[in-house]
Image (cartoon, rainbow, N blue to C red):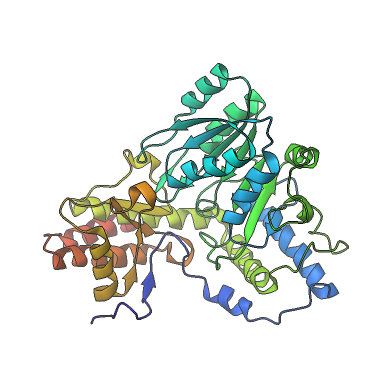
Amino acid sequence: MRYALDADPVITLTSGPVNAYPDVLRALGRTVLYDYDPAFQLHYEQVIGKMQTAMRTSNRPVILHGEPVLGLEAAAASLITVDDTVLNLASGVYGKGFGYWAARYSPNQLEIEVPYNQAIDPQQVADMLTANPAISVVAVCHHDTPSGTINPIDAIGAIVADHGAYLIVDAVSSFGGMKTHPEDCKADIYVTGPNKCLGAPPALTMLGVSERAWQKMKDNPAAPRASMLSILDWENAWSRDEAFPFTPSVAEVNGLDVALDLYLAEGPEAVWARHALTAAATRAGILAMGLDLWAADAAIASPTTTAVRTLEGIDEAKLRATVRERYGVVMSSGRGETLGKLTRIGHMGPTAQPIYAIAALTAFGGALQALGHPAPVGKAIDAALAVIDAAA
């Protein structure tokens, strides 16, 4: 059975946006309450409480009402001053991209950049901080999605904390899919969202903010206030007794509420385990087909995305189009420097289930066969099933 390119896909196996859980979609249809209705004010406070539990933070986290790129830009605008020296860690397109925001707010920027199939070595960070004691802010992307690789943010965070610098972490596509929390990595601003591993639509930012980051932002006269980019405006919005700076995204807060309920009810460790198992099964099948992972070392491959290196002679865009047209499955391209060089298979939220590894391998291998490459799909599925069976 074939699916037209303009038809809805049957399965979305992208690295985001991802499929939302059915219960989350139903929650979006709840009554949209007036934001000053006491019922909504109480509801908002309760959702913040669930976020605090899920993120394992000492401080109440913050919701910004826009998808997580808002939170990343807001972090740069709010925490970085003209007097700061910023160290940006670039192991991929998104890590590199944060440096462009940072440069708007401070002219003093250093960078460690590695090939986009590698991860940042914590020793490189330690050496850079030793050589440049003026560094006061460090930024790192945990899971650089366009490469499907993860950086060791807990080790990096410990080094940064010892130096006394502030740490900004992009955990947009890692939180909820693996063990990572703001205080684990000593982040001062930890940016994530519900639109990846929590299985909700892309509309909100979730922020963990340390006490000293709050103070630094308050001391920064250039930090946005009365602005969509403001973090400060939302410091006390968690309380039912405080006014919202502007109208919050009521329907999306309803969706986040249910996404957090699902995450906490299943148990974070169980959620992380099924993300890891789905990724491991997918990778076993990819390797059994004779294909290569993009990551230089499997140890840095993210449990939430598998990036497959494009075969020589294969048009990557045509490959994804064939996957969609023939099988109704959608996968992600690379971005920027990785565009055309890899295909990304997402394992996030509802699709972080082993059955989707089988679907991904069937569609990917079948599309390669359709394009004239002899991909042994049966062998790939056997390899994936072996991983799944071993975990049972």
Q: Residue most toward the top?
A: 131
- Which residue does the image show at 44% across and 29% down from the upper left? 121
Q: Number of marks in the image?
A: 0
Name the quarter where the N terminus is drawn.
bottom left
Is residue 75 visible in the rendered image? The answer is: yes
Above or below for 88 versus 21? above
- What is the x, y in percent for residue 63? 69, 58
Name the quarter where the C terminus is drawn.
bottom left
Above or below for 59 versus 130? below
Tell me: 363 left or right of 253.
left
Above or below for 40 versus 179? below
Picture quadrant of residue 24: bottom right
- What is the x, y in percent for residue 194? 58, 61
Q: Residue most toward the right?
A: 241
Is residue 392 visible in the rendered image? The answer is: no
- What is the x, y in percent for residue 137? 63, 33
- Which residue does the image show at 86% across and 61% down from the upper left? 242
- What is the x, y in percent for residue 272? 49, 53
- Which residue does the image show at 81% across and 68% down from the upper left? 42
